[in-house]
Image (cartoon, rainbow, N blue to C red):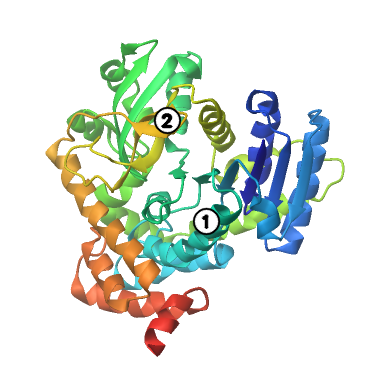
Amino acid sequence: MKLAVIGGGSTYTPELVAGLARERERIGLREIILHDIDRERREIVGGLAQRMLDAAGYDGDLLVTDDLDRAVDGASFVLVQLRVGGQSARLGDETFPLACGCIGQETTGAGGLAKALRTVPVVLDIAARVAELAADAWIVDFTNPVGIVTRALRNGGHRAVGLCNVAIGIQREIARLVGVPPDSVFVDQVGLNHLTWVRSVLIDGHEALPQLLAEHADALAAGAPRAVLEELNAIPSYYLRYFYFHDAVLAEQLDGVPRATTVAEIERELLELYRDPALTTKPKLLEQRGGAFYSEAATQLVASLSTGDHDVQVLDVRNEGALPGLADDDVVELPARIELEGPVPLPQPPLAPELLGLVQHVAAYERLAVAAAISGDRTLVHKALLAHPLVGQVPQADELVDALLSGGAEHLPQFRRGALA
């Protein structure tokens, strides 16, 4: 089996390589391709990847390349983990909305839209080459905003599924809190990517959410008061804080250091560590980069898609009627059973009104975001901002459209074409 990683020069890659090396026999892995357009990064990260694989006794092939066709030709899996514009673009996503009194975040709100507009066309171009050179390959998207990118891929007819590490992170935290193996814990997480709630937790097949909320609500609240969890009777993902505590988060962002600045510094340190020819394991500093348990989630998904083993995993897939109140073509994040033909979303009880309203609101925004990213239509950008709960006002949307399209013009060629037309 051949697996290609697009964005293989990412500092995440050693985390992924560690997982692939552990599971290489189970998934029949014989060839790993790391693709990246940044020569320095792909050489540094590729060198560490080779040392890690050698230390793990991997006897297959590793290729590091900037040739996309060579990377995806004949692949069984194409993992996409790229960042168009790098950390400097992320810094813009996290800061330009602040001037309008809006939260700056790279996966939601105005910043998330900016990233989606840059990213969707690039990923679709990659997917077109996959369709040409590896028609049966699965595209696994880890690139944020995962829900929007996966929606664009599925709209384009591609064999694609989205993957996020939030669910596996909650699973591992619950396992740690109650002192059981992670495999004993099943997390029923439902909603949209980065807009989910855990409404049920099974430990060894028995419902454990009421006890978890009674005994560990503070630890699971991700900064929210435990009363919020108790009222919702659910565990909201970390990203709900941008909606539930908008003003407090905005105040923090106005006074604090952007996460992008911190991550850029961590990346510089990581790349320096990766240069060490004696390093053969992922450094501990990588834990501060984010993406915890990504390798476990990715290898579990690859293994299950390879065998159709009916394993149930939380994935980003088309709704197809599984979650009432959303359209069939909305991309939802929920448990899906993995068959040979692909993931099948499991039917869900309806969301409570206080959850459903927010999900429907953001799903409408995501639909507009995909249309704007593909068309280069400025009006659709404005409509997407109006539809998003973190913006939703005409004066702010007017100002944000200008800031978004001018500040990101280098990576938004579709809007230049639209202006010329």
Q: Assess whether mark 1 and mark 2 are in contact (beta carbons under 8 angstroms).
A: no
- SS at circle 1: helix
Q: Which mark is residue 228?
A: none
**Neighbourhood count class around disc 2 (C-alpha, 10 Å): few under 14, some 14–19, many 20 upward:** many
Q: Point out the residue furthest to the right here.
A: 277
User: In this rendering, would 404 be left or right of 38?
Assistant: left
Q: Is residue 260 left or right of residue 285?
A: left
Task: Give the Cα separation between the discs numbered 2 and 1.
Answer: 31 Å
Who is closer to the viewer here, 126 or 6? Answer: 126
**Residue 127 numbered mark, or none:** 1
Q: Relative to 348, does residue 401 appear above or below in the rendering? A: below
Q: The disc labelled 1 sits on which kind of residue?
A: Ala
Residue 163: % across, % down: 46, 41
Quarter the N terminus occupies: top right
Residue 268 in the image: x percent, y percent? 69, 57
Residue at the image position 68 percent from the left and 63 percent from the top: 37
Query: What percent of the width, then of the height, locates residue 351?
Result: 18, 35
Residue nearest the viewer, comparing 359 with 299: 299
- Residue drawn at (51%, 15%), measured in percent from left and top? 181
Q: Quadrant of the C terminus?
A: bottom left
Quick check: 408 above or below 223?
below
- The disc label shown at residue 170, or none: 2
- The amino acid at mark 2 is Ile
Q: Nearer the viewer, mark 2 or mark 1?
A: 1
